[in-house]
Image (spheres, rainbow, N blue to C red):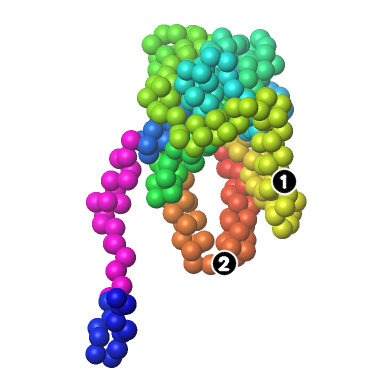
Amino acid sequence: MTAPEATSDTPATPEPKPAVTSWRDSFAVYLQPRVLIVLLLGFSSGLPLALSGSTLQVWMKEAGVDLGTIGLLALIGTPYTLKFLWAPLVDALHVPLFTQVFGRRRGWLLLSQLVLMATILVLAVADPARSPWFAAFAALLVATASSTQDIVVDAFRVESLPESEQAAGMASYVAAYRVGMLVSTAGALFIVSGFESAGLARPSAWMWGYVVMAALVVIGIVTALAATEPAQSKGAEAATHAQNAAERVLHAALGAFSEFLSRKDAFAALAFVVLFKFTDAFSGTMTAPFVIDIGFSKVDYAAIVKGVGLAATLIGGFAGGFVARRYSLATSLWIGGVLQAIANLSFSWLAHVGV
């Protein structure tokens, strides 16, 4: 039998209404085990950033290292910029023993975290007053291990979360990343000050402060052990099992770069990414030693970062979202660029006013 044709007397079957997600369901996605794993990995990614950046610069300033040398230490952050160069290696190569036991993503994750803990401990025993360049080299190792961890966490997050949980996962990751940065800036400075108040000499206080930061890497290690290898990673590993290491690396590298370069105005986009926040990167690198140099204490700086700094970051994030929703992309970028210039000019005013 054929279905009767719809007539004016035959009521049309109503289309199902799209399901409305309740507030409870929207919140519940953040409690999914996969999202919680990503949240804890976000903390692990954010923790090391300041240890080779602003916190290290405060340490060096207190150790008597001149501002010119501290400014050159901005190069320590180079691995975060160039990590795309060895991302294909991380994506394609297997880690002996780790990959067999934990899988491709978790194996690299655990290896990078163990190396990260070891390099932070090496930095802890460095003495910037006597050998600032050894401390800088140790910090470069920390940045390299940290950026490698970032590569793996990004891949793990994308592969382990279904599309419906990607937004919640990214929001959780960014929030926890900020908390990790807060712990390694304000938290580390408060810990060092606490050790000094307990009677430790300043070099010993800084050493034990960094040891505490190294111990916090355990949070990421436990998270990696508790996680499960993404199904997508297992499938990719099985598909490339017959290829040798060189073939896997070449395939991953060519695929990533050719896909990007095939896009319209790829080089213009790359230049924009590099240059739009160029001055912000320079001023951000020197903020901590500059604030200490004009007379603020590290406890003052920690309080600013923890209080006003965190509030400004959160408010700025919501404001940026509003601007991007209200105006065109080009207009939003102009607004951001002008505000960025004004913010950097405020350092000149602060240098004139002082504490």
What number is the disc on residue 105?
A: none
Q: Which residue is drawn at the image coordinates 42% and 14% (left, top)?
A: 195
Q: Is residue 159 left or right of residue 130?
A: left
Which residue is at a point 52% across and 61% down the rendered structure image? Answer: 324
Q: Earlier in the sequence, mark 1 or mark 2?
A: 1
Q: Name the outermost residue toward the bottom.
A: 8
Q: Residue 12 occupies which quadrant of the picture?
A: bottom left
SS of the residue under disc 1: helix
Tell me the mark number nearer the camera, choosing from 1 and 2: 1
| Image location of residue 143, percent across then percent down | 60, 25
Find residue 328 and name its label. 2
Q: Identify the mark at residue 258; answer none if there is no mark.
A: 1
Magenta residues span 14-33
- Kindly report the distance in space between the C-alpha atoms of the residues bearing marks 1 and 2: 29 Å
Per the image, is 15 magenta? yes
User: What is the x, y in percent for residue 188?
Assistant: 46, 23
Q: Position of residue 284 (x, y in %)?
A: 60, 38
Which image quarter: residue 150? top right
Q: Is 45 left or right of 74, judged from the image as shown?
A: left
User: Which residue lies at the image location 45% right of the left edge and 35% below the top edge?
Assistant: 231
The answer to whether residue 274 is above or below residue 103 is: below
Q: Check the picture and name the quadrant holding the N terminus.
A: bottom left
How far across and how far down the image is residue 344, in percent?
Answer: 62, 47
Question: Circle 2 sits in a helix, a strand or a loop, which is it?
Answer: loop
